[in-house]
Structures are given as structure tokens and as C-alpha cells.
Image (tube, rainbow, N blue to C red):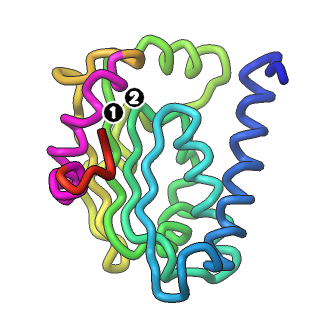
């Protein structure tokens, strides 16, 4: 299957996010009381953004605990709507962005979008919304550009999700 352009990839990411939300809302694979953490890079952040929107519409607020966005192509253009939709997240929303991400800068210029991988979500950088914490971290010094995230992914997880060290020791991650 070949994806012809970024518009088609974006539409498929949105569809994947809706499907993910439906699967999470069913909770059959995980058990009724299980919550999940979502982590996404690049277009994966669009999957997560659409998942969060859909969970909010379904009034599912106890499925997703923490969300981690790395080099995000997702756009939070309607911040008021997002402040409501983020209630679907029980814990933190961590946004790691880089000012020198040329891939996302090209996306911004060609599509007129404001990807979260280039800037903080919400203007004040760190805000509390209805018991939900939004954290923005400029990782330009660590991740430099879009293609560098892969090589520093474990380091970023160690910095922003300390439980990762325990999971790695238990062999959940190589």
C-alpha cells in the first residue's frame, strides 16, 4: 500500500486515532480497570490527538493516563476546544518540541499548520487545566532535528517518564 502525499497520511492517522479510541473504550484487551500511556512521534501524534478527541466525545475519561508527544505533527489550533478535550487524559500531557525541526517547519510552511513539535502547547508553556498537567519541553539541545528523535528516544523517556527505567529492567524495552 502506497501513501501518495502527506494529506493522505494525515487522514489515515486520524482514522487510526478514531479506531484506537474505540478499541480503548471497549477495554476488552486490557481489562476494565487498566489505563494506558500513549506515546507518539511525528504523525503518531496525530493518531493520539484524534484518539483524545474521540475519547472525549465518547465521554471516556478514565482510559488514558499520560500522553507523550515527540516531534509532533499534530496541530492544536483550536486551544479552547483542546482544553476541554484534554479532560480525557487522567495524568500528564508531555510535549517535547525542537525549534530546529526542519521537517516540521516544511510542513508548517506548506500546509499553514502550527505543529506542536515546533512550539509549546498553549502559550504559557506550563499550565494546569482541570487537574490535568500540560508540560512543554524544548529538547532542541537533545533532539536537534526531526530525524534525531529516534536515536535519543530512550534518553527522552528516562527524562520525562522515570518509570521507563523500571520497565526497561523488566525487559519490556530493549
Where does the image place residue 20, in percent across and percent down from the top left?
66, 60
Most frequent secondary structure within the magenta stretch: helix
Q: Is residue 157 left or right of residue 25?
A: left
Location of residue 147 by image quarter: top left
Q: Is residue 153 magenta?
A: yes
Q: Residues within 10 Å of mark 1 (few under 14, many from 20)?
A: many
Q: Residue at the location (32% across, 64% down)? A: 92
Q: Are marks 2 and 1 in contact (CB under 8 Å)?
A: yes
Q: Position of residue 79 (x, y in %)?
A: 51, 55
Please tell me whether residue 132 is drawn above or below residue 118 in the rendered image: below
Q: Is residue 16 magenta?
A: no
Residue at image mark 1: 97
Image mark count = 2
Quadrant for the N terminus in the image: top right
Give the magenta part as a residue range: 148-168
Q: Element under label 1?
A: strand
- The answer to which image quadrant residue 44 occupies is top right
Residue found at x 72% / y 69%: 22
Task: Judge by depth and name the residue closer to the eye, 113 or 25.
Answer: 25
- How far apart are the two marked residues, 2 and 1, measured between alpha carbons? 5 Å
Amino acid at each position: 500500500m502506497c501513501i501518495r502525499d502527506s494529506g493522505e497520511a494525515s487522514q489515515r492517522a486520524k482514522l487510526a486515532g478514531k479506531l484506537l479510541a474505540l478499541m480503548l473504550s471497549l477495554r476488552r484487551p486490557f481489562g476494565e480497570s487498566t489505563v494506558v500511556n500513549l506515546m507518539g512521534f511525528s504523525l503518531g501524534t496525530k493518531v493520539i490527538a484524534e484518539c483524545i478527541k474521540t475519547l472525549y466525545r465518547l465521554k471516556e475519561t478514565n482510559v488514558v493516563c499520560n500522553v507523550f508527544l515527540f516531534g509532533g505533527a499534530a496541530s492544536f489550533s483550536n486551544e479552547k476546544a483542546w482544553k476541554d478535550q484534554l479532560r480525557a487524559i487522567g495524568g500528564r500531557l508531555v510535549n517535547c518540541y525542537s525549534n530546529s525541526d526542519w521537517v516540521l517547519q516544511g510542513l508548517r510552511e506548506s500546509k499553514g499548520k502550527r505543529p506542536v513539535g515546533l512550539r509549546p502547547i498553549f502559550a504559557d508553556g506550563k499550565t494546569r487545566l482541570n487537574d490535568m498537567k500540560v508540560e512543554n519541553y524544548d529538547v532542541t539541545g537533545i533532539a536537534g532535528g526531526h530525524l534525531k528523535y529516534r536515536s535519543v528516544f530512550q534518553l527522552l523517556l528516562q527524562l520525562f517518564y522515570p518509570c521507563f527505567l523500571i520497565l526497561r529492567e523488566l525487559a519490556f524495552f530493549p
